Image (spheres, rainbow, N blue to C red):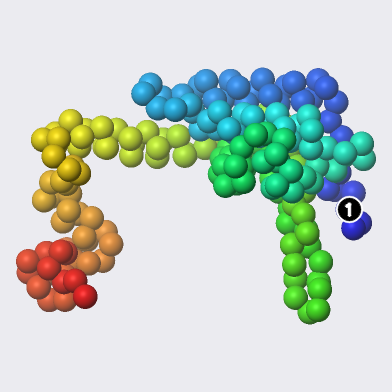
Amino acid sequence: MRVAAWQRQILGDADRRRIMEAARRLERRTHQPGLHGGCLRRTGIILLWTLLYRGPSRHGVCDPSLGQLAAWSGCARSTVQLALQRLEAAGILGHVRRGLVVAGRWSQWTSAYLFATPERWTASDTDARSAEVSAVKKTLRKESSGEGRARLPAAVLRDLAVTWGLRQEASGTDKCGDPAGPGACQR
């Protein structure tokens, strides 16, 4: 398979170290107490190291398969996919899907991974969302009596029903026309 010149990226040792140190700083800066890691998590750091030090060929093309990345990093394939999503959300790397047309259908062959300099990284909002969700879960767990799952307050249920379109805000009835609420209309 031919590789376009813009898909080649030759990084020296100093560039690799700079990217890894910036990623570790980002991980420490976004770490929230009580949560597992920051926006990259441990697997994101491991996968970034794997991509930087084992991924590129001598020609500067970084295009290992998900299976290779999983074997090299010691993670499951699904974990590698999630870690890649976190790395992309943080702006650390981007990937280009490359494929072939076989019998009239496009088929993905590999993905090329390209690294951004730390100055160009974007601020990720995944850590903020995760922290908010975790804070709400912790609050609900503390408020629950410990029996089964935590029950959401009625006001929160109403707001969620309006957000999901199950209930109209003005009239107070859901899409089924039942004033009893979102749980009354089940098919």
Residue type (three-letter) at the residue carrying disc 1: Val
Q: Secondary structure at mark 1?
A: loop
Q: Residue at x 83, y 22 (%)?
A: 13
Q: Quadrant of the C terminus?
A: bottom left
Q: Position of residue 178 (x, y in %)?
A: 9, 73
Q: Residue at x 70, y 29 (%)?
A: 49
> Which residue sits furthest bottom?
104
Q: Position of residue 74 (x, y in %)?
A: 65, 34
Hey, which quadrant is residue 174 in on the image? bottom left
**150 or 177, nearer to the observer:** 150
Asked whether, in this view, residue 184 is left or right of residue 98, the answer is: left
Up/down of 38 relative to 114, above or below: above
Q: Position of residue 169 (x, y in %)?
A: 16, 63
Q: Quadrant of the N terminus?
A: bottom right
Residue receiving disc 1: 3
Count of residue discs: 1
Asked whether, in this view, residue 77 is left or right of residue 180, the answer is: right
- Near mark 1 (Cα within 10 A), the count class, few <14, some 14-19 or many ≥20, is few
Q: Position of residue 36 (x, y in %)?
A: 44, 27
**49 or 89, nearer to the observer:** 49
> Which residue sits furthest left?
180
Hey, which quadrant is residue 91 in on the image? top right
Q: Residue at x 58, y 20 (%)?
A: 25
Q: Residue at x 64, y 23 (%)?
A: 22
**58 or 31, nearer to the observer:** 58
Asked whether, in this view, residue 149 is left or right of residue 131, the answer is: left
Hey, which quadrant is residue 179 in on the image? bottom left
Q: Is residue 113 visible?
A: no
Q: Is residue 55 visible?
A: yes
